Image (cartoon, grey):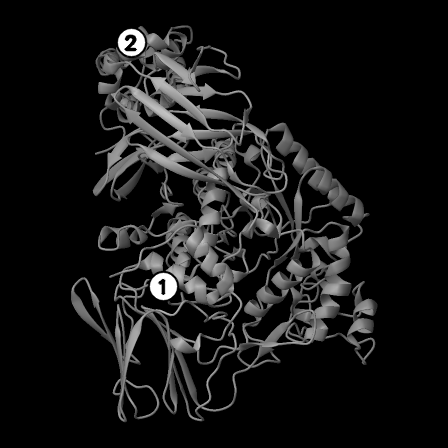
Amino acid sequence: MKRLFTLLTALATVLQAAAVNPKADPKAVVTTPNARFTVLTPQLIRMEWSQDGKFEDRATLTFVNRELPVPEFRVRDSRSKLTITTSELTLTYLKTGRFTDRNLQVTFHLNGEKVTWTPGLTDSLNLMGTTRTLDGCDGNRLGREPMEQGLLSRSGWALVDDSRRHLFVPHDSHWKEWVAPRPEGERQDLYLFAYGHDYKQALADYQMVAGRAPLPPKYTFGYWWSRYWQYSDNEFRDLISKFRSMDLPIDVLIVDMDWHETWGLRRHNTPLDEYGQTIGWTGYTWQKELFPSPANFLKWTELEHLKVALNLHPASGIQPYEAPYEDFVRQYGWKEKGKSVPFHIDDPRWADAYFDTVLGPMEKEGVDFWWLDWQQWNESRFTPGLSNTFWLNHTFFQHAAQSRPDCRPFTYHRWGGLGSHRYPLAFSGDTFATWETLAYLPWFTATASNVNYGYWGHDIGGHQFHNNQKTTDPELYTRWLQYGVFTPIFKTHSTKDPRIERYIWSFPDHMFYMRDALRLRYTLAPYIYNAARENFDTGVGICRPLYYEEPEADEAYTHGEEFFFGRDILATAVTQPVDSLTGLAERTMWFPEGRWYDCATGAMYDGHTTRTLHYTVGENPWFARAGAILPMNPDGVQNLQQPCDTLVLTFIPGDDGALRYYEDDGISQRYTDEYATTQITKRQSGSVIRVEIAAREGRYAGAPDTRSYELRFPATFPPRSITIDGREIPYSRFPKAGEWTYDAYTLAPVVYTEALACDRPVVVELALDDEAVAKQELLYGKSGLFKRCVDLTVEFKLEQGRHGETYLLLPKEYLRVSQCPNFILERPESALELISTFDRTLRQMFETTDGMDLIGAGFKERLHRQLGSDANAE
C-alpha cells in the first residue's frame, strides 16, 4: 500500500532533521562481503558493490542525507543469495560479484502488473529532467546539450548511478566541507527509485536524501529587467523613470557585462587570452566612463528599491590589469606577480581570496547577487570529472549564506547535475526569438521539476534573432510576456542587437497588453510565494507537469504546452499569431479532472475534455480550479520588498474550497521555523456563501498586527446583502473600507474590509437571491465578451469612419451588448434580468450589424467570431 503524500508539517520536520547526516541508520543496512544495500524507503534502495569491500558513508554532490526513519523490511540471507522485501518491492542478489542483469533484480507491481528491473536496463519511458543550457534552442531542437534523464518514469522506476559523483569531505575552514574524488578502485553506487506512478512521493523522498530546494527571497518573484547593452548609470536612471511613469512594477535590475572594463572587446578581431577566452569577457574593474561612482549608483538602486546583480564570466581568472589583482594575489599567495592567476574555484584558498577581495568589496557597496553567465568548459581543469557549473553553484551559494546571514542565499546560474536544486536560481541560456521556442518552454520548465529543479528563468522574448528576422515581433513578445507570468523567474533579456527591442513603450499597439502581463505577475505574487513554500516542504516545483495529478491519463503526457502552476492554476502559452481576419488565435487545451474557470474569459470547462479555444492578443489564458481560493495582491503594488497591508482573496466559482495562506519576512534565512499561516475556507449552503478567515497561527519578525481584505467572487450575481462578523455592510458605487461593490466586467461582488486583527477570526457572508443561484451558469463566459467589446467598440468606430460616417452613432443593439456591464454597474439589481436576456440581445445585435452597409464583411466576421457562439470553443 502506497504511503500518503504528506504536504505539510510532518514531512517538513523529517526533512529538516534529514539534511545533515549522510550515514544511514545501521538498522537500514544489509551487508554482504562485497555488496551493501540500504533500505532508505519502501520504494528507494541504495545498492553498493566495491571490489575492496569498502563502502561510502560520506555525502556526495547528489545525496547528502541517508539517515531516514527505517522502514519495515524482511531479509533472507543464504550463502549464495540475498533477498530483501519491503512493502513495495523485492530485491534479489545472487552473490556472484559486480552487479549485472544476471545477479541482481528488483521486482514490484505497477497497476497490477509485475515489473522487473535489472542493471543495464534501458529506461525508454523516462520522463526526463533538465539540461545545463538552452543555448541555440529553437523549439524542440534543444541546442548544444541534450536533456538529462530524471527521477520519474512511466516504466515505474528510475535509476540514479552515483558511482562517479564526487564527495563532500570535512574541511578545516569556514567552508566546513569541500569536494573530493571517489576512492580508487572499482565500485558501483546505485539508487533505484521504484515509485510506480506515485510521482509526488518520489520527489518528496528524493529531497529527504538530496536536500531541500531553499525558498528564495520574495523579491526574486518580481519582474527582472535585463539586457546586454552598454548602459551608463544615467541611462539606468532614465529607464527606471520611464517604468515609474508608466506605473510598471519592478524588483530586479540586471547589469550585464558592460558594467566592467571589456578591454579588447572594444576592438574588432579581439585576440584570445592564454585561457582561450576573448579578452574582456572576464572582468572585475568598473567602467568609470559609464559608472563614475559605482557606490553612488548602487546607493541609488537601494533608494529605488531595486535589487542589483552584475554579470560575471569568470573563466579567465584574475588578470594583472584588473583593479582587485593586487589584493587577490596578496591573500592567495600567488608567487608569479604580474602574471594572471588561473580560475581555480575548486581550490578553497583561491575561492576565499576571490570572495574576500574581488566580489566581497562590491557586495559591501550594494551588489545584491551575481549572474554567473558561465559559458566555458563543463568540467574543472584541476579536479577531473567535477562539474564547474555545480561547484560554482555550491561555492557562490555557501558564500552568500555565510557573508549575509540575515539574507537568503541564492545565485543565478545554470543546472550542474543532480543536487543543483539546493542552489537556486537558474537561467536557461541563449534561445532564439521564435514561436517554436515559446511553444517549447512550457514543457521544458515543467519537466525540470522531475529533478526538483523548479526555478528556471528564461530570456523572455528570446535572446537572439534567427535566420531572416529583421525586427521584434510585438505579438510574439506580448505572448512571451503573458507566458512569463507563469514562469518561476520573470526576466526579460536579449543580446546586444539594436534590432531587438524590449521596452514595452516601443510597441504602442501592444503596450498595454504587455503592461497587463507585468501587473498580473504582481497580482499573483502571494499565490506564487505560497507555491514556492510548497516546493520547499514537498519537493514539488511551482511549474509541474499534468501527470503529477493524472498519472494514468495519456493526455497528461502529450499536452506539453500546458502545466500546473502551483496546485490550483492550469497555465499555458498562446504559441501562434492571431488570425488577421478574426483577431483570434487558437489554443487547444486538455483539462484535467474537475472543473476549470478561464480567468481570461470567465468561461467554465469540465475536466477530461479537450477544447479548441480562441483568444485575442490582449487575452492571457490561465485557468483556476473550481473552488480554489487564490491569494493575491491589490492593484498598484510596485515591488515585492515592501509590505502590503491588503490581501486580496479571489474565490473561484464552481465549488467550495480552502486555502492555507503562508507568510514570512520574505528575506531572512529564518523561514524554516519563523512563519505564519492563515486557514481560509469558503462554503456555499443554498443561497448563502460563507467565508471564514481563521486567526493567524505562527509568528515572524515584522508580521503585521492587522490587515485589510479584498474579497472577490467572480461569476456571481450581486447578493441581496453582505455581512462581516454579522454586521451588514452597504453597497457603494465608489466603495471604501467597510463597503462592497460589484465589478461588472468580471461579474464579481467585491468586499472591502477595514483593517482587522490578524489574530482574530473573520466571517463574511453573502446572501444571494435563490433564482440567481439557480442561474449562475449563465454568467460563465460573459466577462470575456464584455472585455472584448472594449476593443471592438474602438474598431467599430474606425470601421464606420473608413466608410465616411464619422459622426454616425453605433447602433443601439450593439450598445446594449457592449454597455451591458455598465448598466449592471449602475443598477446591480438588474444583473439577473440583463444576463438572462443577454443571448437574445446578442442575436438582435447580429441581425442589425449583418444588415449594415457601413461596415465590411471582414468586420462582421470579426464580430461573430469574437462575440458569437463559437467565441470560446469549437
Q: Residues within 10 Å of mark 1 (few under 14, many from 20)?
A: some
Residue under label 1: 128
Given this view, does label 1 or label 2 mark the residue nearer the observer?
1
Give whichever of discs 1 and 2 has the lower sequence position: 1
Location of residue 336 by image quarter:
bottom right
* Residue 265 image position (x, y, % from top left): 69, 61
Mark yes or no: residue 364 visible: yes
Residue under label 2: 813
Q: Residue at x 31, y 12 (%)?
A: 831
Location of residue 721 by image quarter:
top left
Q: Residue at x 24, y 15 (%)?
A: 770
Q: Residues within 10 Å of mark 2 (few under 14, many from 20)?
A: some
Instruction: Assign a secondary structure to mark 1.
Output: loop
Q: Inspect the image, locate mark 2, and give the three-letter code of the amino acid beneath it.
A: Glu
Q: Inspect the image, locate mark 1, and give the three-letter code of the amino acid beneath it.
A: Met
* Residue 158 image position (x, y, % from top left): 33, 69
Q: 372 and 190: which one is in front?
A: 190
